Amino acid sequence: MLHEDRLGMNMAHRAAIRSIERVVGENAPLQDPMVARSGIRGMLEAGSVLVLTGAGVSTDSGIPDYRGPNGSLLRHRPMTYQEFLHEPAARHRYWARSFVGWRHMAQASPNGIHRRLAQWEARGRISGIVTQNVDGLHVAAGSMNVIALHGDLEQISCLNCGALENRGHLDTRLHEANPGYLERIELDPSLVNPDGDVSLDDVHVKQFAMVGCLVCGSPALKPNVVYFGENVPAERKARLKEIEARSSSLLVIGSSLAVMSGYKLLLDARSAGKPVALINGGPTRGDAKADYRWRSNIAEAMGSLGATEGLETAL
């Protein structure tokens, strides 16, 4: 049984690495922007559009994306769930990096894209938002019906006993355990990764002191987010199915759809015969399957849609 468990863990880890390293290239001809804009406008005017957002909607808030021209994957490979679960040294390295990078994430504020989506939801244009991001900015912008597909960095769970702790509270404890640590590090905000950590040299990683769970004392703490190689919780999948069922179409914004958890929404919509539209700065995995694909700066495309009669908003 132990051998089978280890084999399964290794297979999951390799699958996670493949997902991280997936290169999304051109798979369909570019579409006339006016055709795409008109089609997306029609979807929004009909209402009940399910919106799936990726890292591209938060870049204007100072949080980099994964696969864009300046994406974090060019310099950093995210840790897999299997590494986090079974390699204490890797987990310690993550927390040292996260202690430095998290405050930049915590200071990020919603941008015009987040606010426009919140207003469209209030007007019944969209049925809700499914986001692959873990930054909490959709909720901060006022969106009410949000499913954080991959969780939220604001909550920490203990892998040993399951106890939960607010990230801000944990940060206070880390400050107390690491006096002067942050002052010794020069942080380039542009190098903060979408999962909230930064690159640190081994010297600074070794100097970092991790704290333990408030309940059981274990240092095996994990952000309550879905890592590469980890499954989306069943309860979240059930909520996702509910919102999919009551939505009339799917609009993907700022995601390459390289990760299956997001790409599956497109496949579900396509299978149900619902219109699918994409707005992204580069190619996506779903281009060949979409009715409308708008290759554009996302903020500019959203502004253009917002200026359309009936969708005007003041941001």
Image (cartoon, rainbow, N blue to C red):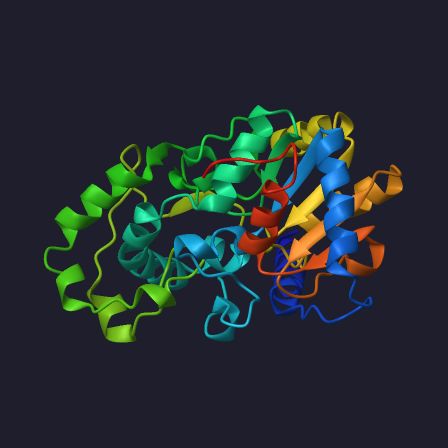
Front-lying residue, 59 or 36: 36
Looking at the image, which residue sits at the far front? 309
Query: Which residue is pictured at 44% across the width and 55% down the height?
Result: 60
Query: Which residue is pictured at 19% across the width and 66% down the height?
Result: 207
Can you say whether 94 is above or below 145 in the image?
below
Residue 219 in view: no
Q: Give the x, y percent position of residue 126.
A: 65, 31
Looking at the image, which residue sits at the far left? 180
Q: Give the x, y percent position of residue 53.
A: 60, 46
Q: Give the x, y percent position of residue 57.
A: 53, 51
Left or right: 223 as drawn, with respect to 113:
left
Query: Which residue is pictured at 56% across the width and 67% down the height?
Result: 68
Total labels drawn: 0
- Which quadrant of the figure has residue 241? top right
Quarter holding the C terminus?
top left
Front-lying residue, 214 or 302: 302
- Which quadrant of the figure has residue 215? top left
Query: Which residue is pictured at 72% across the width and 71% down the height?
Result: 25
Q: Give the x, y percent position of residue 224.
A: 45, 41
Residue 220 in view: yes
Front-lying residue, 289 or 60: 60
Left or right: 283 as drawn, with respect to 70:
right
- Which quadrant of the figure has residue 26? bottom right
Left or right: 169 as drawn, with respect to 113:
left
